Amino acid sequence: MASNNDPFEFRDFEEAANLLDANRDAVTISIGDEDLKAERQKPAGGFSPDVADDDPLGSDDKTELLAGQKKSAPFWTFEYYQAFFDVETHHVKERIIGSMLPWPGKNFIRVYLRKNPDLYGPFWICTTLVFACAISGNISTFLQNFENSGYKYTSEFQKVTIAATAIFTYAWLVPLGLWGFLLWRNNKILNLVSYSFMEIICVYGYSLSIYIPAVVLLTIQIEWLRWCFIVVALCVSGLVLAMTFLPALRDDNPRVMIAVIAIILLLNALLAVGCKTYFFSTPESAPHINDTLAAVTVKQTSP
């Protein structure tokens, strides 16, 4: 049997009260309702939740995301450009249709891009246009000389290189120069509308989409109809560019505004007319001259 002096023996509250009466100098601790609630809410193990003990990296990421201040990757990294290829299919379709059917007064950047430019659409539009020019140009050359018995068809693969150089130079270097000019003018005139470099590239890329069906139709061997196709495509593409960049220059000097818009339209016209004259030139008269000379030679040699 346990001894009465055993300190680990359970004792009733009445006995505890008698002990307190015997020893008036003992220290007592009172546990109230609030202390009991706090004790119950305290997690097991004696640890209290502390924000500082959480993962600091995860906390920083959550804070930046909620505040909209997530740092972007540097522009020389792949992650920076990867974001511009993350675009929905219906957005690309909507932007292509908007570039082919421009409506007066609608700014392409404000209506279709909405601060979310992409490089997916412009890249594939330029690539498709390159192969469309090269393939349609070869088909046009074959059809032009189809009735010539002495003509032997050979594929002109150099047209792919020439088309790629012209189209990608226009779609990338011209926006770079325009962006630099607008940035310079914006520093001098503070109330000008400013566009980012990616937004300008996106506009130029989508403005070339109208040339893809026009280039395919240029295989038709009717010269005046060819020029009609290329002029319509030129006007549609130029209208998209003019309506987009006119608001950015409206508050500038009128002479500067007219000069910049004229240069934009002139470069667009040079690309269209250059592709027409190089890839879809009119049939040369050299085969006919050779046939005439051959006929004259036969007549002279005949008795």
Image (cartoon, rainbow, N blue to C red):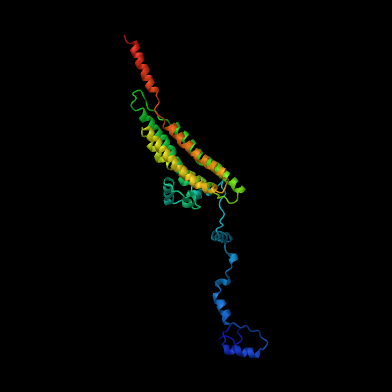
Relative side of 133 to 8, left or right: left
Which one is in front, 248 or 116? 248
Foreground of the two, 303 or 27 = 303
Quarter residue 14 falls in: bottom right
Asked whether the viewer can see residue 211, the reply is no
Looking at the image, the residue that sits furthest to the right is 25
**Residue 261 shows in the view:** yes
Hey, which quadrant is residue 237 in on the image?
top left
> How far across and down, in percent of the image, does residue 3 sit?
59, 86
Q: Position of residue 302 (x, y in %)?
A: 32, 10
129 in relation to 44, above or below: above
* Residue at 58% from the left image edge and 82% from the top image edge: 32
Query: In the rendering, at what x and y percent does residue 122 appear?
Result: 47, 44
Question: The N terminus lies in which quarter of the figure?
Answer: bottom right
Quadrant in which the C terminus appears? top left
Check the image and report above or below for 101 versus 32.
above
Outermost residue, top direction? Answer: 303
